[in-house]
Amino acid sequence: MTIEEKIEKMQSGETYLPTDEDIMALQLDCLEKQYDFNLTRPHELERRAELLREMFAEIGEDCYVEPPLHANWAGRHVHFGRNVYANFGLTLVDDAPIYVGDYTKFGPNVVIATASHPLDPELREKAYQSNRPVKIGRCCWLGAGVIVLPGVTIGDGAVIGAGSVVTHDIPANVVAVGNPCRVIKSVK
């Protein structure tokens, strides 16, 4: 199986072994650039932007990601629209695609996770996992410490309150908070 086929399986939702030698080698190459990004100095803004363009699958104009960034694949499977802002400590478990719309804002220490592990302990013991993409709409705001779980879609204009755990889809133009995250009001 080629590395492209292995990556395709990894992103298909099927269980697979992330410890595969080819997958790990490619992943480590990606993480080298993330390491460089996280070591940039505050005035090296152009260098940061250049590294993000190399690291991410897609990154729009005027995006700003504050180091440190933590991502399983250094953004290789992440698609940011334009004018996305991410505060300190963004964690992207980007084993499957993560899509973020224009003008979305992330507070400090937000976690976007695409990976899951099996309920069966025997499969977990063997290190199997599966992945589902996450989609975050345009002009959203995720407050400090928000956690978004695999397979979730958050609609355009949604505000997710600090510390929330988003376990299911959230519609557009609402404020949602809590664990599990639930809609408390409309913003339009």
Image (cartoon, helix red, strand yellow):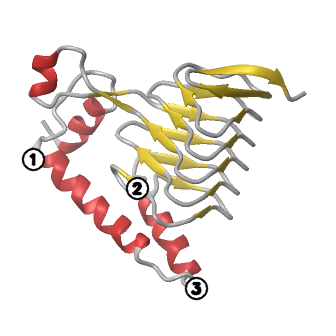
Tell me the SS state at disc 3.
loop
The amino acid pointed to by label 1 is Glu
- Tell me residue 11's x, y (percent): 34, 32
The amino acid pointed to by label 2 is His
Q: CA distance from mark 3 to mark 1?
A: 37 Å
Q: Nearer the viewer, mark 1 or mark 2?
A: 2
The amino acid pointed to by label 3 is His
- Give the residue at mark 1: 21
- Give the residue at mark 2: 70
- As drawn, the label of residue 10 is none
Instruction: Tell me the quarter of the image containing the C terminus.
Output: top right
- Tell me residue 171's x, y (percent): 71, 21
- Tell me residue 112's x, y (percent): 48, 40
- Residue 104 in the image: above or below residue 182: below
Answer whether labels 3 and 2 touch (C-beta < 8 Å): no
- Give the residue at mark 3: 43
Local crowd size for mark 3, using a 10 Å CA cut-off: few (<14), some (14–19), many (≥20)? few
Among numbered discs 3 and 1, the one appearing first in the sequence: 1
